[in-house]
Image: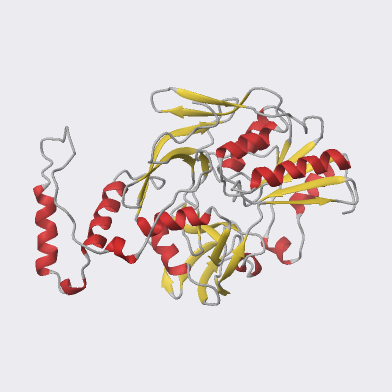
Amino acid sequence: MENNLETKNSTLKKITISFLIILLMSGSFLSGVYLTNKNDKEVIFTDSSFAGKVLNLNSKAKNLDADVDFNLFWDVWELIKKDYVMKDKLKEKEMFYGAIKGLVASTNDPYTIFMDPKEAKSFDDDLAGTFEGIGAEIGIKKGGLVIIAPIPDSPAQKSGLMAGDRILSINGESTVNMTVDQAVSKIRGPKDTEVKLSVLKKGQEKSAEIKIIRGLITVNSVKTEMRKDNLFVITVSNFNNDTEELFNKAVEEVIQKNPKGIIVDLRNNPGGYLDTAITVASKWIEKGVIVSEKFGDEKKNDYYNKGLSKLKDFPTVVLINQGSASASEIVAGALQDYGKAKIIGMQSFGKGSVQIIENLKDGSSLKITIAQWMTPKGNNINEKGITPDKIVDLTQEDYENNKDPQMNAAVEALGGGKK
């Protein structure tokens, strides 16, 4: 499989590595890394997508087990419509999409999901970089709903939410046994509206209620800073539509200013385009495999470096934390394996499974896990994540006192001093 794939038919296929982060904005799903050309999918969505009758056409399903009888499905369907106490409020399209979601959920894989047309449109809108909401990603980890990463300068970050914070309730409703989709629907909403979260922060025993006013969020995925100690900081918040162009500009700025070292801050970076992650890692890695895609049958695809390695001679530190996932882990893992950077911070999230997204004819989408991502040395990113060369935590107390021991450790590793 080549690095730059072309769309070969009207059904756009996108390979992703997504850890089911959910952008709590007007859209809902931003899922990991895409291997795709970056053409926008055109989806026309109106409420009519949920209107009309469900057609009972002949099934395309083949080779079913002997004890699978689809008549049972229709028996249940008719019983619900006939006997449900509030059957006048039933909508057939919602029943239909709900049934498909149940089918997909039977895989017991949190990254294999079905998105109805409205959710699929939100998924695409999220990649544009402008959102309404609180500006945080959430996921399920160790059985609880957690903040994966707050978006920089978002209402979520300004309220003090941090990666690893556990959400115990939303507007007074307990999140116990609540799915990510359900949590998203309760937290997201239009700007200038309020949501109340009960949050248990790491290291604390008592939860606190946090009130957040949703807002309009525009994200530039790359920011740069030339420090007074001659260190250059590149902060990458996502690997999205604008990242490659902005990162290339950052590289040229590095060449022009010739710092004595580079700090690449990938903390709270949830992912983005695989192709962009490969481009970023290739700025340091002159030749070789950047990441491998391993399938269940032991087959694998290798993705190699591309472009000029303009940063290969600059001492580099990469910062990661619990909110670094997917594309972030690919970049950090590749630079670590080739000895091109020292990794500092906390163990990354560990999202290294591969999904292919099929956009369906009614505007809905199906995301299916097909493989796992491996670092150049063959380390499985999924679940394990990337282990830093130096473990440095950033506590709530540090955050509240505007201290950043992780950045300080990176500066020290590169021989820097005052900012």
Image coordinates of residue 208 in percent, x first then y, are 56, 73
Q: Where residue 80 sits in the image (x, y, percent)?
A: 14, 64
| The one of 14 and 419 positioned closer to us in this rendering | 14
Residue nearer the viewer, 305 or 167? 305
Is 309 rendered above or below residue 156?
above
Judge from the rendering whether residue 358 lies leftward or rightward of residue 323; answer left or right: left
Compared across the picture, whether 299 is left or right of 245 comes to left
Q: Quadrant of residue 116?
A: bottom left
Picture coordinates of residue 136 (x, y %)?
A: 56, 61
Tell how many labels.
Answer: 0
Q: Is residue 405 visible?
A: yes
- Foreground: 212 or 129? 129
Residue 280, above or below 142: above
Confirm whether residue 175 shows in the render.
Answer: no
Image quadrant holding the C terminus, namely: bottom right
- The spot of residue 159 in percent (x, y) is 63, 70
Residue in the foreground of this view, choosing between 4 and 416: 4
Splitting the image into 4 quarters, where does residue 254 fall? Answer: top right
Residue at point 65% right, 42% down? 244
User: Is 293 left or right of 43, judged from the image as shown?
Assistant: right
Q: Residue sitting at 56 percent across and 70 percent down?
A: 206
The residue located at (78%, 48%) in the rendering is 233
